[in-house]
Amino acid sequence: MTKLETMIGRAESIVILGHVNPDGDCVGSCLAVYNYAKEQYNKRVTVCLEKAAEKFSYLAGFEDIKNQLEEETADLCICLDSSDRERLGEFKICLDHAKESICIDHHITNHGYAMENVIDADASSTCQVLFTQMEEDKISKAVAECIYTGIIHDTGVFRYSNTSRKTMEIAGKLMEKGIDFSSIIDDSFYKKTYLQSQILGRALFESVSFLDKRCIFTVVRKKDMEFYDVDKSDLDGIVDQLRIIEGVECAIFLYEVGIHMYKVSMRSNKKVDVSKIAAYFGGGGHMRAAGCTMSGSFHDVINNLSGHIEKQL
Ligand code: AMP
Ligand code: MN
Ligand code: MN
């Protein structure tokens, strides 16, 4: 029995939390545990997350996700893909009130804020760690779809350097559960609505290279988001597109979240450890993918980041 199984087994009520701005690994891991605990243990389970992108609506249990706090006290609180307590957002109160808690994650910066912590910084994704916490025979097709979704999103469909032999072996085992992996990849990762494609095109068109074309950034302002009628989840993938431009070592994507406030996403190829830079500005992440929120004009933000990148290049 793994730690997760033991704890699910003895809890009557379970609340599952992820991180703010939930991504594929976050939604996938939360719904994987949700379905697993319901199917195998018949428990009362609630998933609390900020509103997740519609593209994940094929995942079983998506409709059951609560965007508002309903119950603060549960026997067990399971925290997934969130590197620290603050990243749980408004739902962190559930962690404080739960009788028991477990955190499953893959962020190197995670120091273990729950009662039990299963953290593997070498794993591609939280979903990969989660797979090792479940009994293979008990993983249903629905759970396999959730785990596969998390893995493909955090590895950019097995392209990023966090992909290992183990990642591929797990993906193979999930394929054997009968999942429609082609549709999962197309529908959740590559497919874009017309407006998402428009804003991607505009962001690329307006991108600016600096530091001898080894860095590139682009910015999307509130008024652009209003014009195209898109929200933050429609901006997924813009930074990844910047990263694969020839000669680019480090790509930066900013979107406006308030007056003189920007959400920063950074991606690097080999030379720059973006997690260090993000951590310096109060954020975090991984060596090749990290983020933070910064204040000032977007020129200030780029100037500040540029100094740190230049030191590493
Ligand atoms: P993003 O650029 O938002 O896609 O995030 C890339 C990676 O950095 C993910 O692993 C995030 O969990 C992490 N990350 C992004 N923003 C923050 C933040 N403000 N604090 C800690 N980690 C972050
Ligand atoms: Mn995540
Ligand atoms: Mn993750």
Image (spheres, rainbow, N blue to C red):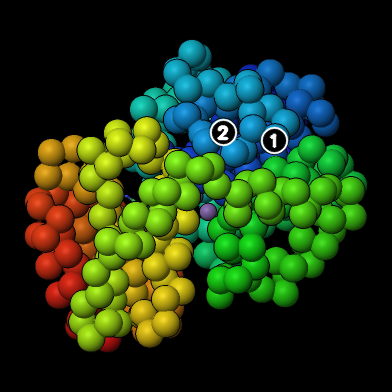
- The residue labelled by disc 2 is 54
- Where residue 166 appears, as percent x and y from the top left, is 72, 69
Residue that appears at 42% across and 76% down: 245
Vertical position of residue 252 compared to residue 192: above or below? below
Say which of 179 and 10 sits in front. Answer: 179
Vertical position of residue 197 compared to residue 230: above or below? below
Q: Quadrant of residue 69?
A: top left
Vertical position of residue 70 compared to residue 192: above or below? above
Vertical position of residue 262 compared to residue 53: above or below? below
What kind of residue is marked 2?
A: Glu
Mark 1 Cβ and ligand 2 under 8 Å apart: no
Disc 2 from disc 1: Cα separation: 10 Å
- The residue labelled by disc 1 is 59
- For marks 2 and 1 on the same chain, the one whose residue lies earlier in the sequence: 2
* Callout 2: SS: helix
Residue that appears at 42% across and 27% down: 91
- Where residue 154 appears, as percent x and y from the top left, is 56, 58
How crowded is the residue under tag 2: few (<14 C-alpha within 10 Å), some, or many (20+)? few
Say which of 123 and 73 sits in front. Answer: 123
Residue furthest top as drawn: 70
- Where residue 258 appears, as percent x and y from the top left, is 18, 37
* Callout 1: SS: loop
Q: Quadrant of residue 100?
A: top right
Q: How many marks?
A: 2
Q: Nearer the viewer, mark 2 or mark 1?
A: 2
Q: Which mark is residue 301?
A: none
Q: Is the C terminus in the top left, top right, bottom left or bottom right quadrant? A: bottom left
What kind of residue is marked 1?
A: Leu
Does 262 sit left or right of 85 as displayed? left
- Where residue 295 appears, as percent x and y from the top left, is 13, 49
